[in-house]
Image: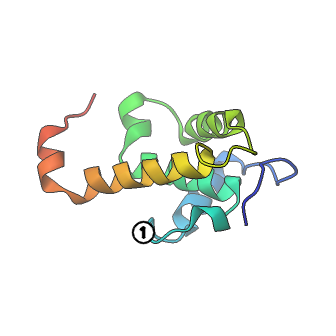
Amino acid sequence: REGSGEGEAPYASPPMLLSLLSDLPELSLSIRPWELTHQDLTLRVVRMLTEMNLPSVLGVPEEALLHFVADVQAEYKADTAYHNFSHAFTVTLICFHLIKDSASHRSVLRPL
């Protein structure tokens, strides 16, 4: 189910955030973003960024990262057929797997 973000439950408090992130299913390439709500997609983006150690590298709490990703999601127009948040999620997922699953990419990329 694709959610518009409107009317969905607010995000969890910081202690619950870690639990939500760890309870998400694996970030496989078989995810069908059009079947998930925008809140589900947002949490998965935060999980990807957390698995890449971005909060630590940037020195920001995961809650701030969650709010940033939610703000980005909110800027996408819900009625756009292709360049929407589901597309952004899919591109992010592909990049995540390219970096995470490829030793050659990891050897070239360095922390900020």
Q: Amino acid at mark 1?
A: Ser
The residue lying toward the viewer, choosing from 44 and 62, is 44
42 left or right, relative to 106: right
Q: Who's the residue at 40% across and 39% down the image?
A: 54
Q: Residues within 10 Å of mark 1 (few under 14, many from 20)?
A: few
Q: Residue furthest front?
A: 81
**Measured along the vertical axis of the image, is residue 100 above or below residue 73?**
below
Q: Is residue 31 above or below residue 45?
A: below
- Please report the residue visible at 60 percent of the width from the left and 55 percent of the height from the top: 41
Residue 93, percent across and down?
A: 43, 54
Of the pair 68 and 30, the residue shown nearer to us:
30
Q: Residue at x 44, y 38 (%)?
A: 55
Secondary structure of residue under mark 1:
loop
Q: Which quarter of the image is occupied by the N terminus?
A: bottom right
Residue nearer the viewer, 83 or 111: 83
Quarter location, residue 44: bottom right
**Residue 71, x across and y down, in percent:** 67, 33
Above-or-below relation of 78 to 112:
below
Count of numbered circles in the view: 1
Give me the residue at 17% from left, 47% from top: 105
Q: Which residue is mark 1?
A: 28
Name the quadrant of the C terminus: top left
Residue 58, by quadrant, is: top left
Percent position (x, y) of residue 43? 60, 53
Residue nearest the viewer, comparing 95 with 62: 95
In the rendered view, how is the structure colored? rainbow
- Residue 64 sits above or below residue 107 on the image: above
Residue 37 position in % (x across, y down): 70, 59
Relative horizontal placement of residue 37, taking residue 49 as reference (left or right)? right
